[in-house]
Amino acid sequence: MNILLTSGARRIDFISFFQAALKDENLLGNVIVADPDKNAPSLQAADRSYVIPHQTDERYIEAVFSICKENNVNCLVPLNDWEVPKLADHKKELEALGVAVFTPSPDIVHKVRDKGMYHKLLGSYGVKAPRSYFTIEEAKEGLVNKEVIFPLIVKPRNGSASMGIEIVHNVEDMEFAYKLAVQTIKETPLDDATSKIPEENVIIQDVIEGEKFSLDIFNDLNGQFLTSLALKQLEMRGGDVDKAVSVRSNELFQIGKKIGENLKHVGYINTDVFYDGKDYYIIDINPRFGGSYALSHAAGANIPAAYIALARGKELKQEWLEDDADVELARHDTVVRINEGKVEDAIKEKTEAK
């Protein structure tokens, strides 16, 4: 049983989760990690490690296929927003190699990557999301009509890691933040992740004040809902949950169930949910494992074990799909030595042959 985690970056914890799951099930196999940075810490923890081109490089998919073929990969799990669209586009070809690919289909990836359409998309499921304005003029009209009031938030429609996000309190700041977001998109991989021009890839929304939650939703390989896990966010760092408390909330679980049953995505998706004291609003959806899953894992869930079972066509254990309630959790850092000799170039031989 060989598992490929792409864009491992700093996620040594995820590697250990999959390694432990293989061991617990008495399965022989390797947890393979690929990343464009040859000094990525995760490459040091993997059983096999590869440096691959960035997802914006036309050779990216070639490198992924090369690793899958060379290692008889059974299960592919992306850990980065920006690579998911590329992998989803080639999902059927990878599945033809015998790889269980834990990404949604391209159409679902497109839907959840567009924050500007959440109000309409999720509204059809009976789930709330903030109203979006796509131009300065639309936002000004919304202010005049009292649909929204300041503060407002300006951000990319397909953003990641809190890039290009600004809270604004007046029209002048809103206009400046809009231009800044456009420039951020032009200078980052966000520009490669959508067909929209940067000026069409910015939205303005009402700011939802209140408690913040991470709500993760897990479906099987056929898009059938399996479970939802919730964390109350206590502290963030670099766009990731740093401290949290595991939460058992029927209302949040039902929101997750509605999204999972209607979206019918494959695998694990991570959402940010804000509660204003009256209603829950979905702010963001990431079509892959969120970094916050590590906290749910520490609270007792074991989704990596479930991934392996699904890839093998085996029955799941209910205990994998639940965590313990009211567990306070905090993330910490660790340090690894970098041994570049441990890392292989996924397409080096082919490049040299040419």
Image: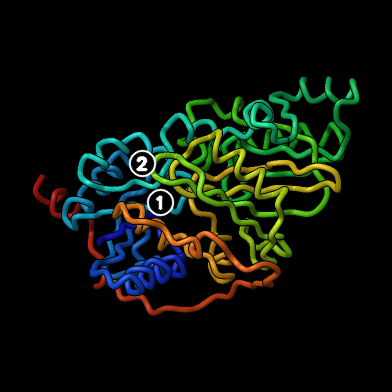
| Count of marks overlaid on the render | 2
124, above or below 60, in the image:
above
Query: Where does residue 300 sit, x and y in percent of width and height?
Result: 55, 69
Q: CA distance from mark 1 to mark 2?
A: 8 Å
Taking 242 as reference, is 19 left or right?
A: left
> Which residue is drawn at the image coordinates 42% and 78% (left, top)?
336
Query: Where does residue 99 sit, x and y in percent of width and height?
Result: 26, 48
Numbered badge on residue 295 = none
> Which residue is drawn at the image coordinates 58% and 75% (left, top)?
332
Kind of residue indicated by mark 2: Leu
**Residue carrying label 1:** 78
In-front residue for pair 214/345: 214
> Which residue is drawn at the image coordinates 25% and 37% (left, top)?
93
Kind of residue indicated by mark 1: Pro
Mark closest to the chain's N terminus, 1 or 2? 1
Determine contact: label 1, label 2, CB under 8 Å. Answer: yes
- Quadrant position of residue 168: top right
- Quadrant position of residue 32: bottom left
Task: Work out which residue is located at the far left of the displayed protein and give it.
Answer: 353
Q: Residues within 10 Å of mark 1 (few under 14, many from 20)?
A: many
Numbered badge on residue 87 = 2
In-front residue for pair 183/240: 240
265, above or below 124, in the image:
below
Q: Quadrant of the N terminus?
A: bottom left
- Quadrant position of residue 87: top left
Is residue 32 visible from the viewing direction of this image?
yes
Q: Quadrant of the C terminus?
A: top left
Query: Coloured how?
Result: rainbow
Is residue 35 visible from the viewing direction of this image?
no
328, above or below 190, in the image:
below
Query: Where does residue 51 sit, x and y in percent of width and height?
Result: 30, 58
> Which residue is drawn at the image coordinates 58% and 67% (left, top)?
295
